Image (cartoon, grey):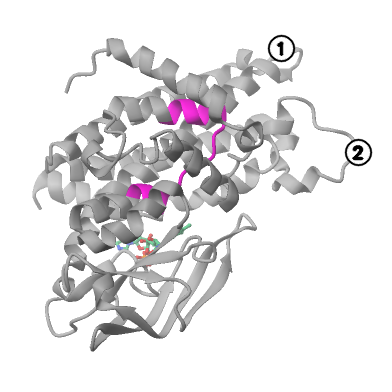
Amino acid sequence: MDFQPDAGLAAFRESVRAFLRTHLPPDLADSQHGVRSPRAALARWQGILNDHGWGAPYWEKEHGGTGWTPQQRLVFDEECAAAGAPTQDLFGQRLLGPVLNHFASPQQKAEHLPHIFAGTRLWCQGFSEPGSGSDLASLRMQAVRDGDDYIVNGQKIWTSYAHEADWIFLLVRTDPAVKKQAGISFLLVDMRTPGITVRPIMTIDGCHHLNETFFDNVRVPVANCVGGEGAGWTVTRFLLNNEHAATAELPALVRFQRQLRTLGATLRVEGQPLIRQTSFARRLARLEAELQAVAMMVQRVAVLEQDHSPAAHVLGSMLKIRGTELQQKMGDLLVEALGDYGAIAYPEAHADQHEPLPHPIAGIGPGIASEMLFRRATTIYGGTSEVQRGIIAKLMFQL
Ligand SMILES: Cc1cc2nc3c(=O)[nH]c(=O)nc-3n(C[C@H](O)[C@H](O)[C@H](O)COP(=O)(O)OP(=O)(O)OC[C@H]3O[C@@H](n4cnc5c(N)ncnc54)[C@H](O)[C@@H]3O)c2cc1C
């Protein structure tokens, strides 16, 4: 693996910076707080990227993506995070998009891909069910064939942003008689279809990200099955590999790093900048070293995936563990560094106070505690750390 500095990369970074300077509207630059930008900001930013030909920064050129190298993608993520640009739709861009590119029929591609590019259709992921999370292949949601449709019945849980999504990609059991992995299919379902009910689950951060999603005799055209009936497990394995790299959330890590550096330079403890405090400086240095390692791992996994190397799977699991643990550690340090201001759990909590918060706390403090609480979940979603460790052990030691 060659990590020599690429002479063209500096020029590429400058072109991304120039684009952000001219195309990122100031009101959108403020919308990056929290784990996901509000729907309106996310959709608007996606439209701007698409108009510039950057609608799919992670896809190959043959699929209409930018065709950027893993290093270029990293630079793009870093610069967008540094400029405070909104997040992109993880589900459409990073999870479903690559699946459609590889497995979908021409009709399915024509129906969905333009909307993913333009940001006009947001997606959610309907995999987990009560009792079927880590053991996903045990899922019970049933899809029974009726002419040109399936009739879908059952429940999904922890469906992130189902309340905002236009469509859902869904795992269902189409054949209960065969080996459990072989009886699963991957369906695309319009969330406006009669029979779908979405109920909120409030999380410890006090926000609404999660839902229970109920399907009661929901009619889904057979034409919406991706990869063919019974191919759901193959499609899912492909998708989960991409999810590991995405859940490391490099842009969020870069944002945390920037905020920690700002606090270190500007907050004062006993008349000295915070960074002069040995305990803070030591922790920040350690986290920055870990961040560099995660950034290299992201590139490595991307290159291995491009080469269809089996090592991508095990490294993806390692990256999932390292990236998500680092999010938690950086979030913890931010809250601690902010002291009393770190306790302002929600951005709106300070809105009615007369005294404005001092710089740079105003831009960092409000909401950081709620984000830190939410990020407790990063080591659970996308496959828990325990399950990832099991995968690593199995693959490394051929158990
Ligand atoms: C914030 C959040 C967002 C989510 N978003 C989505 C979403 O959008 N769509 C979706 O489909 N799902 C989503 N999920 C669900 C997520 O994928 C599951 O929570 C996860 O896979 C774990 O499954 P579970 O909750 O059923 O826990 P369980 O599988 O019941 O696990 C319980 C405990 O047992 C441990 N365990 C289980 N099996 C093993 C094993 N083989 N070896 C060692 N330890 C094991 C686990 O590590 C965990 O500690 C989300 C979850 C969270 C918290």
Quarter location, residue 83: top right
**Residue 218 or residue 209, whichever sits in front:** 218
**Residue 77 or residue 314, whichever sits in front:** 77
**90 part of magenta stretch:** yes
Extreme left residue here?
398
Quarter location, residue 324: top left
Relative to residue 187, is residue 83 drawn left or right? right
Q: How many marks?
A: 2
Identify the magenta region: 77-94
Q: Residue at x 71, y 45 (%)?
A: 347
Q: Residues within 10 Å of mark 1 (few under 14, many from 20)?
A: few
Ligand 1 is located in which of the four quadrants?
bottom left
User: Could you tell me residue 210's position as x and y percent?
Assistant: 52, 63
Disc number lying in front (1 or 2):
2
Q: In the rendered view, would you say 42 is above or below 252?
A: below
Q: Which sits earlier in the primary sequence, circle 1 or circle 2?
A: 1
Q: Residue at x 53, y 31 (%)?
A: 255
SS at badge 2: loop
Q: Residue at x 62, y 40 (%)?
A: 31
Where is mark 2, residue-wise?
354
User: Could you tell me residue 247's position as x and y percent?
Assistant: 38, 45
Q: Could you tell me what secondary structure mostly forms the magenta stretch?
A: helix
**Residue 384 or residue 34, whichever sits in front:** 34
Q: Which mark is residue 318?
A: none
Q: Three-letter amino acid code at disc 2?
A: His
Relative to residue 10, is residue 4 drawn left or right? left
Rounded to the nearest whole Å, what is the CA distance between mark 1 and mark 2?
A: 28 Å
Q: Which mark is residue 272?
A: 1
